[in-house]
Image: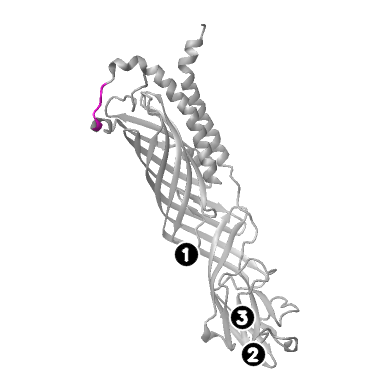
Amino acid sequence: MRFAVFYIIFFAGSSVLNTYAQSQTTNSTNAQDTLQVDTIRNQFLPTGIRIGTDVISIVKSRIQNTFSGREFNADIDFNRYLLAIDYGNWGRSFISSNSTYTNDGRYWRVGAEANFLTRDPERNVFFLGLRYARSNYSESMSVISTDRNYGDLTRTFTSNDMKARWFELNAGLKVKIWKIIWMGYTGRLKFGLKKDDAQSDMLTHDVPGYGRTDRETAWGFTYHLYVRIPFRPTTSIQPPKK
Amino acid sequence: LGNLPLVYLYAPKIMIKRLLWMGLIVAIALSCLEEPDCVNLKNGYIGLSFRRLFAINDTTLSSKDTTLVLSAINANNVPFNAGANAVKGIRIPLDYTADSTLISFETGGKKYQAVFRYQIQPQFISGDCGSRFVFGDLNVPKELSSFDSVNVINRTPVDTLATSVVHVHLFIR
């Protein structure tokens, strides 16, 4: 069901942006005189690197006392494909009536994205991608529990050096705002979580980078602010249609 | 033509900006996703079935064996009502403060006991629900049982006493 929703959102966005790409084609016909015929090798040379951060995690860290985290993102283009890397850390802390919980850890993701705006001279990006992610974290929980059969329990459980990995199906947008400033967002469908808590002191509640572990899939959303450092002038990936 | 050419040139940019705003709204909506349910936070209940060893047709204990009673859990007094059907079977809660529970029974002046071992791991659920205890890998070591035979048929305890699931068959002669 979640995969179906993801694809509906993706194709709805895709049809809107195809319209945009075609209009860009029309707009850029005036620049045909300056187009150069690239060799295959030149077509796959990167034109720039984008480095950015997730704005949502910064805002959440400010306004929520249960979350603290940062995420940094980078990508580099190879023709219509992008190599993307994310690195972040997050910690959560919760207090309930019978327990307190804290975790802290780091995570990274690496993957590829395919740009569907191939005729855009500014190389704005509407992408679909796949990522592999890993997280290394520790967590701790203190419990005060009362049971009418077996009495009270007061104990602290700790799990250190825990590891988890998962995959993500991504879709999103990266748009040039002004000169080297770019913005964009990424929707994430996280799936295939594997964690090594079967023999640990406690079962994992939250994996940094993934989220709550009580579902087989999880949604994520990041909103990015980027700086793009160009290596060479950009043109559209495919020449505009005549 | 008025402002039509201007609108035509800037329409794609406006659309992109709208998509960016739409993304932000989606992000806010996703942050309000549902919280987990606060029910069935402890799955430490098991069903025991008492059986007659070497019985040919029906191995279930008959009504004449009504003297079989649950006498103790972890050397304490029975902390709950064993119920009227204790002869054929009983459902009991496992001790969540330890990784084993000792249960004693008496029938016809003879005492039986068994140690139920299991893995127990706590897990935080949410700020509203607190934590839960997850039981698993139930087993009954043969050397720690005075029953004539023990057969574990289900290793995962359940989250309610109101169940007909049987986890262990305990045999007496």
Q: Which chain's residue wears label 2?
A: B
* Residue at image location 56% in from the left, 37% down from the top: B28
Give the SS element for disc 2. Answer: strand
Amino acid found under the numbered disc labelled 2: Lys
Q: Are marks 3 and 1 in contact (CB under 8 Å)?
A: no
Amino acid found under the numbered disc labelled 3: His
Give the SS element for disc 3. Answer: strand
Asked whether residue B119 appears in the rendered view, the answer is yes
Residues tagged by mark 3 and mark 1 found on one chain of the structure: no
| Label of residue A53 in the image | none
Q: Residues within 10 Å of mark 1 (few under 14, many from 20)?
A: few
- Give how far across and how far down residue B41 sits, in percent: 62, 61
- Up-down: is A227 above or below B14? below
Mark 2, mark 3: which one is toward the viewer?
3
- Residue where numbered disc 3 is placed: B169
- Up-down: is B19 above or below B98? above
Q: Which residues are magenta?
A: A36-40
* Residue at image location 25% in from the left, 32% down from the top: A40
| Label of residue A198 in the image | 1
- Give how far across and how far down residue A97 sits, in percent: 62, 57
Q: Residue furthest top?
A: B1
Residues tagged by mark 1 and mark 2 found on one chain of the structure: no
Q: Residues within 10 Å of mark 3 (few under 14, many from 20)?
A: some
Q: Residues within 10 Å of mark 2 (few under 14, many from 20)?
A: some
Disc 1 to disc 2, C-alpha distance: 36 Å
Who comes first in sequence, dot 2 or dot 3? 2
Q: How many marks?
A: 3
Amino acid found under the numbered disc labelled 1: Ala
Does B111 appear in magenta?
Answer: no
Give the SS element for disc 1. Answer: loop
- Residue where numbered disc 2 is placed: B111
- Up-down: is A180 above or below B83? above
